[in-house]
Image: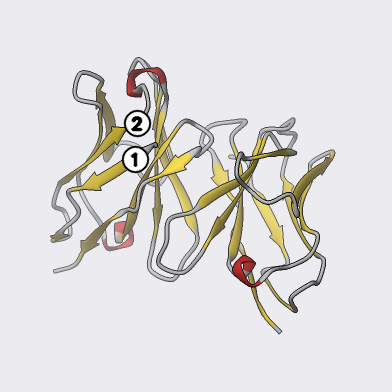
Amino acid sequence: DIQMTQSPSSLSASVGDRVTITCRASQGIRNDLGWFQQKPGKAPKRLIYAATTLQSGVPSRFSGSRSGTEFTLTISSLQPEDFATYYCLQHNTYPFTFGPGTKVDIK
Amino acid sequence: EVQLLESGGDLVQPGGSLRLSCAGFGFTFSSYAMTWVRQAPGKGLEWVSAIVASGGSTYYADSVNGRFTISRDNSKNTLYLQMHYLRAEDTAVYYCAMGLWGDYWGQGTLVTVSP
């Protein structure tokens, strides 16, 4: 199975900060990766698909990039509604696998 | 507007069985693969199973393979997850999602496995 590691596991940031979250795949997955945001008690919501494509309706402060097997989610200017847990999902090889998550909270 | 409504979650004893359902609205259900994802209390997301649009191919996580069966009825716009030999570690909120890439998600249904 493909293992997804995610870093950091948590971070504290202030409104307006630039935030970067990284997922690394244990083997090549091309661009077959999505990013999800989950708020407490709510279902996850997809932000990015195909590693770099912004989901319709998602603010442009969110962006995704890829370098080899390393994938990055960047929030250019953190807003109050962005405090949440973020997950990556590889959908290249079955069984698909999520990263363990990154919790973003208020500094 | 895409809507996914899960149902069937319940309290069940270890070794028991349960069937979850997910009704899809606002999209052409028969054209999309569908996925189940679960989240144990206080834990991260775990991909569980997926089924292609026709129902002809199914895929499972190692943790549920041989115990869970995913299926769909495109005439009823409904996705199912039949769960057998349930264990305490299957306790989770179960979400259905549209597509293989998690395009849209339902609100989830809680399965509790406990004596």
Q: Amino acid at mark 1?
A: Gln
Furthest residue to the right?
A67
Q: Residue at x 26, y 46 (%)?
A: B6
In the displayed structure, does residue B72 sit left or right of residue A19?
left
Q: Residue at x 35, y 15 (%)?
A: B54
Which quarter of the figure is the C terminus of chain A placed in? bottom right
Which picture quadrant has residue A52? top right
Residue A39 on image: x %, y %: 50, 65
Q: Residue at x 14, y 47 (%)?
A: B17
User: Pointer 2 indicates a residue of which chain?
Assistant: B
Judged from the image, the secondary structure of the residue bearing numbered disc 1 is strand
Earlier sequence position, callout 1 versus callout 2: 1
Query: Which residue is denoted by mark 1 in the rendering?
Result: B3
Of B86 and A89, the residue lying toward us: A89
Cα distance between the residues tagged 1 and 2: 6 Å
- Number of other residues with Cα within 10 Å of mark 1, as a class: few under 14, some 14 to 19, many 20 or more: some
- Number of other residues with Cα within 10 Å of mark 2, as a class: few under 14, some 14 to 19, many 20 or more: few
Judged from the image, the secondary structure of the residue bearing numbered disc 2 is loop
Of B84 and A65, the residue lying toward us: A65
Which quarter of the figure is the N terminus of chain A placed in? top right
In the displayed structure, does residue B88 sit left or right of residue A104?
left
Q: Amino acid at mark 2?
A: Gly
Q: Are marks 1 and 2 in contact (CB under 8 Å)?
A: yes
In the displayed structure, does residue A69 sit left or right of residue A39?
right
Query: Which residue is denoted by mark 2 in the rendering?
Result: B26
Q: Is residue B54 above or below residue A98?
A: above
